[in-house]
Image: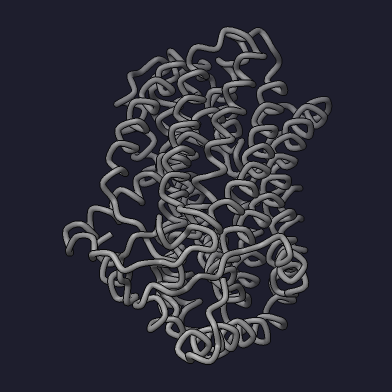
Amino acid sequence: MCGWVPVWWGAGMTVADESRADRPGGHPTRAAVSGGGAHRLYTVVVFIVLAALDNVAIGLVPPLISPISETLDVAEGSINLALGITYLVSAIASVGWAYVGDRANRKPLLMIGTLIWAAGTLSTAFADSYAGFLAAQILAAIGLGAVASVGFSVVTDLIAPRRRGLVMSFWGLSQGVGTLAGVLIGGLLGASDWRRPFYVLTGVGLAATVAYLFTYNIRRGASEPQLAAVVAAGEYEHRITRGDLPDILRRRTNLWLILQGFTAQLVFGSLVLLPRLFQAKAEDIGYSQSTAIEIGSMYATLFQLGGVMSIIGGLVGDRLQRRTPRGRALVAAVGILAAIPFYIILFFVPISLDVADGAGTGSVVTGVLASVVTEPVMFVSFVAALLALALTSANSPNWFALIAEVNPPEHRGTVFSLGNLVNGVGRGAGTLLIGRAFSSLERSLQPPLNYAVGLAVFQLFFIPTGIMYWLASRTAPRDIATVQTMLAERAAEVSTPAHPRQS
């Protein structure tokens, strides 16, 4: 985090009263700069924590599928279905949240969204029927849609283009860490009582919302060099309209960046059930369900630590983008395709560890960590996982950065939400279909082999993803140049009295 703050502060930000600037048709007025260095640091920390917490909420259910299904007296496939539905609902909701966010003050929207998902999380803990569980998860998903799309719009206004890949890697990393934390918290706190982690997360989410009250608002376009004088004067007034939507979709790079999300998320949606694979591996060597859940959650978390390497993917993307405007898309394409064989190795290597069945959580955690060093097969698994996640993590920061670079500030939240909608459809479909694949394969393959084969087959969807990134690399140079020219022309219009400002 220490390496992140100077990059954000170096974007030339001037903080003003966004609530005035965002009134449709209104004229922004200058406001006092909000806070100094400590206030900015506080804002960055709170924003990271909120982004992470939203993804903790996403990660709680997957490691607890077995006990939740038993308590609600439904098949595990019904819980998988609920997961798929919530991903889809969150993605659909994000489009509406983003459109409003691209026209209005974003800070209240983020707070409302956080309160909604916290209410859904608390309701999940009280659910005593499948219908109640599904309704609570849908409520949480609606709130999560706001944080994803509106939050992205805010973050892009904090980042200078030169460092966009690096900083977006931290943004994506906070979400990835949040998801892993959700898996870990769900598995460890919920192994004996699956409702407990939902209570805990609700309290933390409410506390973080209160903390967000004291952050400052970020002005649109603050990170764009072409708009420096305009933003300093508080005069960037462009807002999205319904008439802009056809132009957004005609931008060819947007098309490829949005569509690749479907096939990519079919794979990532299947990987949500990675804890179930490791749970089955643990049960296969004799562990009881409760201990196996803890073991599966620990391995799933440990083996996804390669996501931290998204920082390198962001740095490489920044560096190559300065050489060629095709750079970011090419980095993402290579990373996605090169990761496939390492994932397959991870799925099929067996687990081996020395932990007594029924041991306490501390003993399970210690035993899992020790096994990576003492057991050769676990070392191979860890290396394969590290490489697989490191390569695919190059996708996230460069996708974020490309969305920002091929769109003007007032379009970014909406374009992100359209991509997020397609992502949600793919992720939901991946989670739902992989559950059905597990069940179908179990007719001829015993667990955990059915889980390993199912996850391996889904890796094939990474191939069209890589191809679409390559296609995006061919159209990105033109679209980036078009946006830069557009912003320069708008700045010239504002600074020239003969040309009235557009609203």
Looking at the figure, which quarter contains the C terminus? bottom right
Looking at the image, is 172 positioned above or below residue 295? Answer: below
Looking at the figure, which quarter contains the N terminus? bottom left
Q: Position of residue 168 (x, y in %)?
A: 45, 64
Name the side, left or right, on which 380 lies relative to 435: left
**Which residue is rendered at x = 71% and y = 68% of the image?**
248
Name the side, left or right, on which 54 lies relative to 483: left
Q: Position of residue 195 (x, y in %)?
A: 46, 16
Q: Hey, which quadrant is residue 413 in on the image?
A: bottom right
Name the side, left or right, on which 365 lies relative to 173: left
Looking at the image, is 224 positioned above or below residue 90? Answer: below
Looking at the image, is 11 positioned above or below residue 114? Answer: below
Q: Hey, which quadrant is residue 74 in on the image?
A: top right
Frontmost residue, 476 versus 266: 476
**Which residue is rendered at x = 64% and y = 21% of the image?**
134
**Which residue is rendered at x = 74% and y = 76% of the image?**
471
Q: Hey, which quadrant is residue 259 in on the image?
A: bottom right
Is residue 49 visible to us here?
A: yes
